[in-house]
Amino acid sequence: MTDRRADYERDGFLVLERFLDDASCDALIERAGEIVRAFSPETYSIFTTREQTRRTDDYFLESGDQIRCFFEEDAFDASGALVRPVEQAINKIGHALHDLDPVFARVSRDPRLAALAASLGLERPLLLQSMYIFKQPFIGGEVTSHQDHTFLWTDPPSAVGFWLALEDATLDNGCLWALPGGHAEPPRGRFHRTPGGGTAYEVLDERPLPEAGMVPLPAPKGTCIVLHGLLPHRSGPNRSPRSRQAYSLHVIDARAAYRADNWLQRRPELPLRGF
Ligand code: FE2
């Protein structure tokens, strides 16, 4: 077993600095900016009208094979008006950038990423989900501790996250935190679709995820952080004047069974593919 795999199996994560070169980081930042600038006002009315729960649910649930923009919670005032320019109000873009956008597809299917996945034991990798995360200056929302397996459930667990820092991620602008060895924790819950058309969070284990022992993972631009699907991790809010943009790609193993009621589903014309 390689040292890298042994570290991953012990800690549940890896921090690989200088994985992506600056030009690739900048190309993704540039492309994400273009996607946001093309984002139509009719689409974001979904978030601003009241009686909106069903529409925002559908907008999210149908995004597994689309490229869609999602707002920061603090981007609107009480009347539903945007409080800052749209480019500074988007929380993330998801969830099929890796299949639908050529710039993201190229980085997502980089042979080095494929080699890294193989070195960690993913024998038949499928690229499941991609997210571009802005962590905007001042209003970048916190992400509370969770296990990605909760959202990307396979039997047995197989989800692995590759989190690429496109800008320096620091304690000030909301870097990741993770619990070394925490991937031994059983899953606390499962987020899934419900027959009525919405979603539910099903509690599987009442115990909160441990907070003690969580360590920050500051990541210079170009760093790849690998996260085991059961590893508890979180990130703080960004109250700093600097964004903390990142691209996150989740891969599962085709040998594991993907649940039919997972929130993320693909239309048959766009099946999951490997690297
Ligand atoms: Fe996560």
Image (cartoon, grey):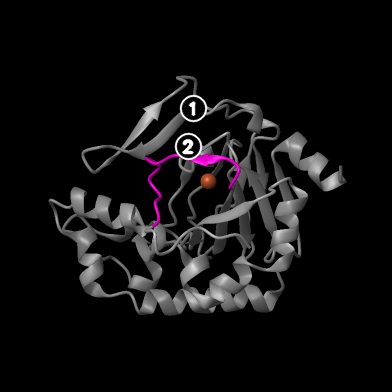
In terms of secondary structure, where does tag 2 sit? helix
Q: Which amino acid is tagged 2?
A: Thr
Q: Which amino acid is tagged 1?
A: Arg
Residue 166 on the magenta segment: no
Q: Which mark is residue 110?
A: none
Q: Which mark is residue 188?
A: 1
Residue 209 visible (yes or no): yes
Mark 1 vs 2, N-terminal side: 2
**In the picture shown, does residue 259 fall above or below 38?**
above
Which of the image's four quarters has the N terminus?
Answer: top right
Where does residue 152 sit, x and y in percent of width and height? Answer: 49, 43
Residue 259 on the magenta segment: yes
Where does residue 191 sit, x and y in percent of width and height? Answer: 39, 37
**In the picture shown, does residue 76 fall above or below 157?**
below
> Picture quarter containing residue 104?
bottom right
Horizontal relation, residue 129 to residue 60: left or right: right
CB atoms at circles 1 and 2 under 8 Å apart?
yes
Residue 213 visible (yes or no): no
**Crowding at mark 1 (Cα within 10 Å: few <14, some 14-19, many 20+):** some
Q: Which residue is mark 2?
A: 150
Q: Residue furthest left?
A: 51
| Residue nearer the viewer, 216 or 12 | 12
| Residue nearer the viewer, 140 or 255 | 255
> Picture quarter containing residue 165?
bottom right
Q: Which residue is found at the position 52% from the left and 79% from the top?
A: 30
Q: Which residue is found at the position 25% from the left and 37% from the top?
A: 195
| Residue nearer the viewer, 186 or 153 | 153
Q: In the image, which residues are magenta? A: 254-266
Horizontal relation, residue 84 to residue 28: left or right: left
Q: CA distance from mark 1 to mark 2?
A: 8 Å
